[in-house]
Amino acid sequence: MKENQPSATAQRVAMRRAAHQLLDDPKVFDDPVALRIIGEESASALQADPHQFEATPLSPYLRAFVAARSRCTEDELALGVRRGVSQYVILGAGLDTFAYRNPYPEGMLHVFEVDYPTTQAWKRARLEEVGITVSGDLTFAPVDFERQTLEEGLRNAGYDSGKCTFFSWLGVTEYLTTEVVMTTLRFVASAPVGSGVVFDYMISPSLLTPTQQSSFDALSKRVASAGEPWKAFFDPELLTKDLRGMGFRYVEDNGPEEINARYFKNRKDGLRVGSLSHIMKAQV
Ligand SMILES: C[S@@+](CC[C@H](N)C(=O)[O-])C[C@H]1O[C@@H](n2cnc3c(N)ncnc32)[C@H](O)[C@@H]1O
């Protein structure tokens, strides 16, 4: 992250979610707030030409992945709520919109949006600007993962560590150090039985094929030039083992085959995620 500046990648992924609403039929992730949250100017530009931000051959894969990881998260959240989850912690929330379309009755699911303080302040200004109201079921928790533990940040925000909780962490782990990612996951693993997490992560470059390597290089260059370089990479097998070691009882890594089979089967438009896509699900 650029010191004291809102995340540039947060706006970019929100633009992809918004583009998904306009470009793809059927939608994998239906988000009626996706266009409003990107701001009036961006929304008008996107509506005028939904393809204008789809600048490279990788764009449809990225749009598909951003849609799929949110869909997968909210599917898992729904299962969690059925088994008693009553808190939802969105780590590195960026312009995530779940809290502004929370489908559960008031008081049933409390949402905590955790984010880098400057990104969070920017989002709150955006919410005001576009007239999205914040319900009593949402608490903002400003936390810089590199400087403060999640535990401390959540405690200050009124998080109840005795309640079954679901965590999501989308598009964030690659921007942190491995140590911070593991410390945070250990905290999640200490949540009551029935709690869970969904997060995506970047595969270790040493495991990539030459074709994957060229996508990796193109993407990593792009985020580094936005001032948000990738720092943490994982081997899916080792990560699965580490999560089990932390105490997660169910751990499921979903690679591109699983994600495409689950969310992109039989599409006429060929939309699908690319080969670098991995979504991890883990349950305490
Ligand atoms: C690519 S955006 C993803 C946003 C959101 N999860 C989504 O999928 O739309 C990355 C997010 O990670 C957050 N982030 C990056 N480094 C962070 C840090 N050190 N502490 C807290 N949040 C951080 C940024 O503020 C930003 O919201």
Image (spheres, rainbow, N blue to C red):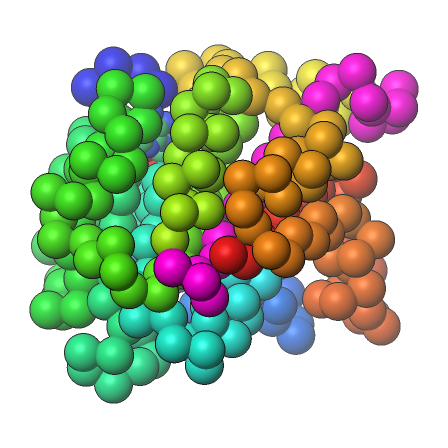
Residue nearest the observer in this picture, 153 or 24: 153
Is residue 105 in view?
yes
Residue nearest the observer in this picture, 74 or 79: 79
Image-based side of 237 in relation to 178, left or right: right
Is residue 201 magenta-colored? yes
Residue nearest the observer in this picture, 102 or 158: 158
Residue 246's image quarter?
top right
Residue range in magenta is 192-212
Residue 232's image quarter?
top right
Q: Residue furthest bottom?
A: 105
Which residue lies at the image location 19% right of the left edge and 30% below the top edge? 118
Image-based side of 172 in relation to 1, left or right: right
Q: Quadrant of ligand 1?
A: top left
Which residue lies at the image location 68% right of the left edge and 40% below the top edge? 240
Position of residue 164 measured from the top left corner of the image (x, y, whole percent): 35, 65
Image-based side of 55 in relation to 2, left or right: right
Position of residue 227 measured from the top left corner of the image (x, y, whole percent): 41, 15
Is residue 97 magenta-colored? no
Position of 159 relative to 102 (above/below): above
Image-based side of 91 in relation to 175, left or right: left
Position of 37 relative to 194 (above/below): above
Which residue lies at the image location 52% right of the left edge and 21% below the top edge? 178
Position of residue 81 measured from the top left corner of the image (x, y, whole percent): 41, 76
Position of 40 relative to 261 (above/below): above
Position of residue 276 measured from the top left corner of the image (x, y, whole percent): 74, 36
Query: Which quadrant: the N terminus?
Result: top left
